[in-house]
Each structure stands twice: as structure tokens, then as C-alpha cells.
Amino acid sequence: MNGEPVAKATLAFQPVNEGGKPGFALTDDRGYFNAQTFEQGDGLTEGTHRVSIRKTHLVDRSGNIVEIIVDDGGGLVEKNFLPNGYADFATSGIEVQIEAKKTNKLDPINLSDARGV
């Protein structure tokens, strides 16, 4: 995001081609990820995939990230810490191409504040 790695972001992959299966990934502290479809490390199905990216946390009424949930009578909400435009396949503008029977190393996915709502 703006040239810095995004840790603990969730990526969802939606296949464009018929027969493809959706996949997902979670970024590490350096912003790297290994995508999976059915089980850890199995990668994505062949073809083009649209990508959505979110980094969410629960926050309290004051906007503080909540690490441990305590019954405080409510008031916790999920907040996305990336521009909302990346959270939807239709508005993210991100697609990746996966080739069969090959180790697919993707180019960096560059995010910016400009994606907005």
C-alpha cells in the first residue's frame, strides 16, 4: 500500500473461466502470500482470476483495534483498513493469470489510497 507491504491482508481470487475454483490467501509481515484453493499450498486453478483484498479488524466505539473480545454490551464493528474499492472483485481492478503445472510467481500488487470507495 503506497509502496509499503501490507501484513495480514486477505486476498480472495474469483475465477473468470468456467471450471475454475475460487481461492484465497493471507499476506505475511512482508506482504507475501501463497494462495490456496482446497488446502494449504495447493495454489490456484488455471486461468484468469479477479482479486479482492481486505485487511479487517474489529474496532471498539473509540476506533481502537480489539485483540480480545470481551462482552462489553456491543459496539464492536468490523473495519477495513484498506480502501474499500479493493474489497470488491468488480472495483478492485486487479486480475492475475495462473498457468497450469507451473510455479506462478506473481508481480507485486500495488495498492494506493486512490482506489477509494
Image: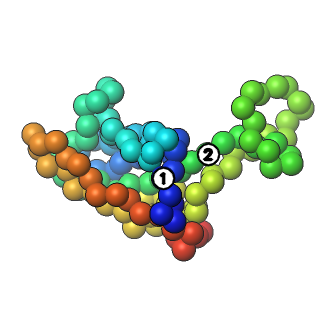
Q: How many marks?
A: 2
In front: 87, or 81? Answer: 81
**Residue located at (25% from left, 31% from top):** 42
Q: Does 71 appear above or below 99?
A: above
Helix, strand or loop for disc 1:
loop
Query: In the image, what residue occupies the spot 46% across and 39% down?
Result: 28
Picture colour scheme: rainbow
Is there any visible trace of residue 103 in the rendered image?
A: yes
Give the residue at the far left of this rendering.
101
Q: Earlier in the sequence, mark 2 or mark 1?
A: 1
Residue 12 point in image, percent of width and height: 41, 46
Left or right, residue 75 beside residue 9: right
In the image, residue 23 sits, relative to residue 54, either above or below, namely above
For residue 116, which quarter of the picture?
bottom right
Q: Nearer the viewer, residue 34 or 76?
A: 34
Between marks 2 and 1, how big is the CA–CA gap? 15 Å
Residue 75: give its label.
Answer: none
* Quarter in which the C terminus is drawn: bottom right
Q: Nearer the viewer, residue 90 or 43?
A: 43
Q: Which residue is identified by label 2?
A: 56
Q: Which residue is mark 1?
A: 5
Relative vertical location of residue 112 with respect to residue 42 in this rendering, above or below: below
Q: Secondary structure at mark 2?
A: strand
Is residue 90 visible to us here? no
Callout 1 amino acid: Pro
Estimate the x, y position of residue 45 in percent, counting from the top left. 21, 42
The kind of residue tagged 2 is Thr
Circle 1 crowding by C-alpha within 10 Å: few under 14, some 14–19, many from 20: some
Find residue 74 and report its horizontal and vertical position in percent: 85, 36
Residue 100 lies left or right of residue 76; in this view the side is: left
